[in-house]
Image (spheres, rainbow, N blue to C red):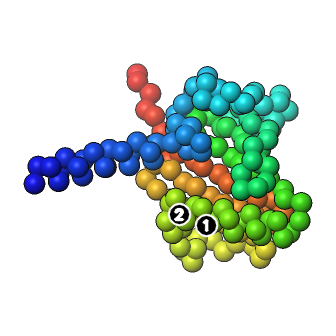
Amino acid sequence: MKKVIAVLVLVSMAWGASAQNLWRDAPMQASPAQIRALMPEARETSAAQRAADPSALLEIPSTPIAGETFSATYHFEAERLQRVHLRTQPATSERTQALLKALQASLRTSYGLPVSTPSRPVATLGTVDVLWSFRRMTVQLLMVDGKTVELIYSANLPPQRLSL
């Protein structure tokens, strides 16, 4: 019995550790320096991009995923990673549909079934909005304008309390 309990504890610890990462093993709450060390291709975003979204501090302008080239933007709050936003615009609607199908299959394999959509706000016709939500992380797959595909990994962490 003790062996079974020990195995269950180890499995739950391993599962919890893997749930701490967002995209490409980027740890939640990592600093920009830590992300750069893990992903040498990451660079600072442009001044214009930071002006439009001050949380967007790092980016990878070109990274292949499922046969398409995505841009990845790393968003931080108080110098801690909160979200990774991936975006692409496939050349044709057929490639967009194939990409969405491939991403949904991969995400279902990794995370199981998405949150049921009837309880969520109704999406506009022609959009895709699929959400996987967990205690510490949310994954969202979107097609917003019929051609732009977005994949967003977000940390679900409570706000940190300030010590007085």
Q: Which mark is residue 74?
A: none
What amino acid is labelled 1 in the image? Ala
Please give the residue where the numbered disc 1 appears in the rendered image.
Answer: 105
In the rendered image, which quarter is residue 73 located in?
top right
> Circles 1 and 2: CB distance less than 8 Å?
yes
Say which residue appears at 11% left-offset and 49% top-offset: 2
Name the secondary structure under disc 2: helix
* Residue 98 percent across, percent down from the top left: 76, 68
Residue 72, percent from left and from top: 72, 42
Q: Is residue 117 above or below residue 133?
A: below
- 90 relative to 134 in the view: left or right: right
Q: Report the residue at 66% width, 74% height from top.
A: 122
Q: Which of these two is toward me, 87 or 105? A: 105
Q: Position of residue 104 (x, y in %)?
A: 63, 66
Q: Nearer the viewer, residue 66 or 89?
A: 66
Where is residue 44 drawn, in percent x and y? 75, 27
Q: Is residue 106 above or below residue 15?
A: below
SS for tag 1? helix
Amino acid type of the residue tagged 2 in the rendering? Thr
